[in-house]
Structures are given as C-alpha cells and as structure tokens.
Image: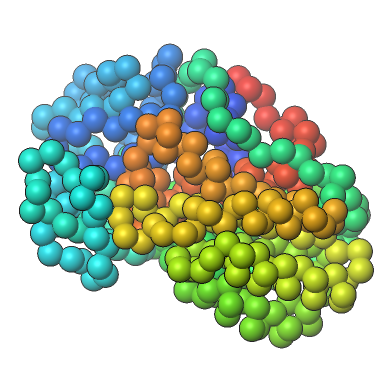
Amino acid sequence: MRDDTKFDRLAYLKPIWYPGIVYHETALLVGEEDAAPLLYKPTRILSVRNYGLDTEYKEGIDYTVEDRKIKRLPESKMPYLAFDDYYRREKDQIDLMLRPECRPKGTEGIQYLKYGEGDTFTQKQIAVTYEHEDAWKGAVPQGKTQNLADAVRKIKAGTAHIEFFGDSITVGCNASGTLYGGNTAPYCESWPDMVAHYLEDKYKVSLKTTNTAIGGTTTRQGLDRFEKDVIECAPDLLIIGYGMNDPGVSKQEYKDMVGQMIARYREKVSDGNVLLISPMLPNVETNWCVLQPEFEKPLKELAEENDFCALVPVTSMHREILRAGKRYRDMTGNNVNHPNDFIVRLYAQSVLTVLLGDEFLNDFSIDE
C-alpha cells in the first residue's frame, strides 16, 4: 500500500476500474447521521480521513461500515454539511434548482441545492481508502495508440509539444492543488499537469506543454480563438475538452464546431494527433444538466471519421460511477459542473489509458 496521508501521483492514477485498493474515494455527508455509498463493497477499510488527509477517523467511534456504506456515528468528529445548508428553500449564489424528482422525501418545499467554489465542498468531504474484490461492471476507456502513434513517438523521444485546450475543467478547476480548488491539502495536481508529469517521469523526458484553456468558455468561443491559441502553437498532440458550457447546443452544431477545429488543426500540423474529451456530467439532480450528456456521441463519430483522433469517454465513465450508487455531491468541487480530486483523477486515468493503452495500465498492479 502506498502512503495514503498525502497526494501520491501514482496512487491517484491507478484506474478506478481496477480491483484491489481504492485510494481516497471521496464522499460528502449531509446531516449528522448520513451514510455515504462507496463505489465497491470493501473487504477491508484501510483508512477514513478528511479530504486534506491529515486527520484520520476511527471505526466504531466516528463511523461504522454497513455493506457498501460509511455511516457517520453520533458525536463523530467526521465533517458534514447540515441538511438545511445543502438542501435550500432559497437559491444560493447561483440558481441551482433541484429537480422535483430528486427532492428527499418529506421536503416538498425545498427547491435548490448549495453551491460554492474553492474548498466549499471539499473541506466537508471525507476520503476512504479500502480493499475490495468487486468487478467493475461498466465500460472502460480503450487504448488507441494506433491512432496516436506520431504523438506517442514524439513523447517518448522528448520532442512532443502537448496543448490542452478547453474550459474550466481543463484549466484545473477544482483540483485541490490549484487556485480554483482552494490551493489546499492534499494539493492534487490538475489533470493536465498529472498527465504531463506522469509522461515525463515514465519516459525520463522533458515535454513542452501549453494550457490555453479558459474557464467559462463555450465551444463557439473556443472555435473563435482557435487560430490564435492553437494554430499559432502548432502542438504535436492537441487535447480538446469542451462542452460543459454548452447546455443548449445541439449535437450536430457541437459536432460541426469541434470538427472545424480538427480540420483546421490538421491543415497546420499534417502529422498531428487529437484527443477529444467528453465532459463529465453536470449535476444530474439540477436544471444545469441539459444537453451536455449527449456530446460524447458526436465526439465518438469524429474520432471514427478521423484516424488521427481518439475519444476519451469521461461522460460514460462518470455516468457509470453514478449508476454504481455514488452521489454527485460525493465527487464534485462546486456541486454544479466541476470535479473534485476523485474525478480530476478519472480524467487523467482515462486520457493516459487512451493515449498509451497497456503501457500505462501495466504500471499498476491490480492488488497494489
């Protein structure tokens, strides 16, 4: 077992779809006696800590384990959000309206959910490290090294220029080690930094990386600034992550805009490769989740139509985690559309799996 008291890049990069040890799976308790579902049924709890990993809680004193759930005990020191602070009758700083079918029983007057940036949510979340033997039941990212061979070759040679282009999630929101995540423990890197540093360490190279992502931007705004921010950079590997801020855009319009980016890029870089990242889901319990869940399909079509591209299916992976019983609040940084460290890691794991395939996956023991 790796050190579970601090950010450890390799521990964080272990694919969540592997059995063995899950490191720092996060959860947010609402109410003093809430029970938080885990992704898998634990065979042994190794630690339950605060999000910053510097405080450990004790079984039988702070919590009990009930099947796949961590239940907070009365008088526990474990953090939680008060029920009336999370479920609200008046809107918070933004109109985060709760869908009627998602209201807790007996709370018909509740219309909104809590919102906050920085460490508003993560300071109240817990991190559970545990062993399990369950099998992941959903799809997993597939290695597409054959589509990305030129970029991989340059990465291994240390001559690659990688550009990350997208919205706030690609900027780094809300990884704990960034300004947008509160710059607080455990100081997890943004997913682009995690990807770049892993590649440099693995191949003992120094890579040129550029992050031109801008928070709050739409795909249309990305297309409008494409010439200046991408074409002039001419990267060997372009990683595009747009869609979260396009709730009312049709699948066809979205495909057309991303397709234009791909075409213009290849006109400039004839041997360049492209990774297309489908966005995590916005909060599925609220009015902020509209058409974003549909964008993975047109990205998949674009990847199939262009043999120098590959899809990173974060939408599908995030959906599978929710289907397995995790709650949105357990893995969000702002309760709207930003990941916490657990889903930041999912981005990095998925990108590296698609980019390197078994060369990445073989770095991780199933039992480690």
Q: Residue at x 9, y 48 (%)?
A: 108
How was the colour assigned to the protein in this rendering?
A: rainbow
Task: In this rendered view, identify the residue nearer to me: 333 or 144.
Answer: 144
Residue 125 against residue 276 in the figure, above or below: above
Where does the image place residue 165, in percent across and percent down from the top left?
65, 69
**Which residue does the image show at 64% across and 83% down from the upper left?**
224
The correct choice, above or below, for 92 with respect to 153 in the image is below
User: Would residue 240 appear left or right of 76 to someone viewing this image?
Assistant: right
Residue 209 visible in this rendered orientation of the protein:
no
Q: Is residue 168 above or below residue 143?
A: below
Q: Is residue 97 left or right of residue 317?
A: left
Residue 327 location (% of width, % of height): 34, 40
Residue under the point 38% across and 36% down:
326
Quadrant for the N terminus, please. Answer: top right
Measured from the top left, where is residue 158 in percent x and y?
87, 58
Of residue 182 and residue 298, the one placed in the foreground of this image is 298
Residue 142 lies left or right of residue 120; in this view the side is: right
Percent x, y of residue 313: 62, 47
Picture layout, residue 103 above or below residue 196 = above
Indicate the quadrant where residue 227 lies: bottom right
Q: Is residue 358 left or right of residue 169?
A: right
Q: Residue at x 16, y 27 (%)?
A: 73
Quadrant housing residue 64: top left
The quarter in which the C terminus is drawn is top right
- Residue 60 visible in the displayed image: yes
